[in-house]
Image (cartoon, rainbow, N blue to C red):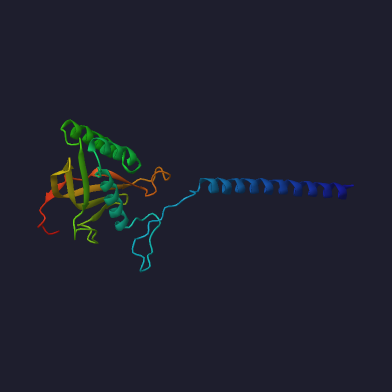
Amino acid sequence: MSRFKNKVDAQQAHITSLRIAVGVLGVVCSGLWYGWQAAPSDLNIHVPPDLRSGSTRKWWDIPPENIYGFALYIFGQLNRWPTDGDVDYRQAISSLSPYLTPICKNFLEGDYEFRKTAGELRRRVRGVYEVLGRGYSDDPELRVRSLDRDTWLVNLDLNADEYYAAEPVKRVVVRYPLRVVRYDIDPQRNRWGLALDCYQDTPRKLSTEEPSP
């Protein structure tokens, strides 16, 4: 009788150990499921535009060429008023808001109101474009300088042209020191993962004969 009782006790102990193992496996599977659910479905990898040679980078690192290209494109779109600055400037700020920090958006909205009050927008046509020979450079002090891991200073040397009723009213060369920040907030609306934080310093008018430093 004792032999049968011992055998039953052994089977019960084995069943208990199996239940514990199943419980542990359940906890492990739950942790794996949570990790799978929490993992991002999309991951932005910034690749330098020149692919003639190989490139090894950390996944979170953004090449300076991409930073420069982003700043040039977004700033150019903000200053592209094809028909009437009174309408085009406001629309540009609204449509590009995913690529602007809240502080920069507020600044631009204030700039819009100031220019409108001063009569600098109505029927104005405006555009900016790179000065020939002053495009992207590998020199960090000249074009793109990293301020920290998530912040960059971008110097854009641009021609700024404005017209009123087909008459030219402004044609200047200006250096715009722009601040760009990492902005991985809304990948659906901002695939760059970057945002313009407006000016790092006051824009400076340049002479067309002034050489780049």
- Residue at image location 73% in from the left, 46% down from the top: 16
- Residue at image location 80% in from the left, 49% down from the top: 11
Is the residue 49 above or below the residue 120 in the image? Answer: below
Q: In this view, does 25 lie to the left or right of 155?
A: right
Number of numbered discs present?
0
- Residue at image location 21% in from the left, 49% down from the top: 128
Quadrant of the rendered image containing residue 186: top left
* Residue 152: % across, % down: 27, 51
Question: Which residue ends up furthest to the right in the rendered image?
Answer: 1
Quadrant of the rendered image containing residue 68: bottom left
Q: Nearer the viewer, residue 203 or 170?
A: 170
Is the residue 104 above or below the residue 143 in the image? Answer: above
- Mark yes or no: residue 119 visible: yes
* Residue 18: % across, % down: 72, 49
Q: Which of 75 and 167 is in front in this view?
A: 167
Q: Which of 1 and 173 is in front in this view?
A: 173
* Residue 78: % across, % down: 27, 43
* Residue 164: % across, % down: 16, 40
Question: Which residue ends up furthest to the top in the rendered image?
Answer: 117
Q: Is residue 76 left or right of residue 210?
A: right
Q: Is residue 31 left or right of residue 102?
A: right
- Mark yes or no: residue 103 visible: no
Q: Is residue 81 left or right of residue 49?
A: left
Q: Quadrant of the C terminus?
A: bottom left
- Residue at image location 24% in from the left, 54% down from the top: 145
